Image (spheres, rainbow, N blue to C red):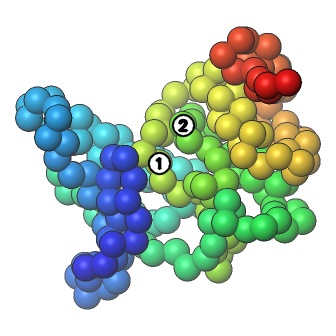
Amino acid sequence: MRLLSQGAEAEIYTIRFIGNKVAAKVRGRKKYRVEELDTELREGRTRREARCMERAHRAGVPVPRLVACSRFTLYFEILEGVVLKDLESIPEGVPREIGRVLAKLHDAGMIHGDFTTANLMLAENGLNIIDFGLSEITKSVEGRAIDLLLIKRSLGKGYPSLEQSYVKSCSEGDVVVSKLKEIEKRGRYQIRTIT
């Protein structure tokens, strides 16, 4: 077992599972939480993430294939590739593909919840969405707009072609982009600079 990454909620290891090398996302106990609450949170979040990954896969959204799920652990295929946030520049055409993939996710009745370049991977099979830890099954226009806002802020100059592709591919793309503009006018979402 080798540690691949460590986040606030879980650690990801490479392990052997039924003879295959897979990733294991383990939600460990948080000692600062009451044990009963901690157990309930970890179980619920693990189940929700598994449901979202499976739903996305069935909808044709490129995600790591879920192999198994236990009480606090998800087992899924390991993707070989590079996370977009680690690239010096985003290859041409990738922003448009991000827009199409996000539209497919949203049309499947889901939001990602942390849709940034840190959770998009260019792998051998193309662009994949990773880390569904904050995802939800919902048709919330606000939630979809927040996904767009997060990728807009993390992608930067490639965003206009992403948005154009998203609007063209998503059944309610215009409605979501309109909500994004409304959200950006709110005080807490505005980017402030010190002069």
Find residue 144 and report its horizontal and vertical position in percent: 65, 30
Quarter containing the N terminus: bottom left
- Please tell me whether mark 2 sits on a helix, a strand or a loop: loop
* In the image, farthest residue toward the front: 195
Image: 117 above or below 103? below
Residue named by callout 1: 132
Q: Quadrant of residue 73?
A: bottom left
Residue 171 versus residue 46: which sits nearer the camera?
A: 46
- Tag 1: amino acid: Phe
Kindly identify which numbered label has been placed on residue 113.
Answer: 2
Q: Residue at x 21, y 52 (%)?
A: 28
Q: Is residue 42 visible?
A: yes
- Please tell me whether mark 1 sits on a helix, a strand or a loop: loop
Q: Residue at x 80, y 31 (%)?
A: 173
Quarter containing the C terminus: top right
Image: 103 above or below 190? below
Find residue 71 and report its horizontal and vertical position in percent: 17, 51
Image: 80 above or below 141? below
Marks 1/2 in contact by CB < 8 Å: the verdict is yes
Find residue 175 and report its horizontal and vertical position in percent: 79, 21
Q: Earlier in the sequence, mark 1 or mark 2?
A: 2
Residue 61 versus residue 99: which sits nearer the camera?
A: 99
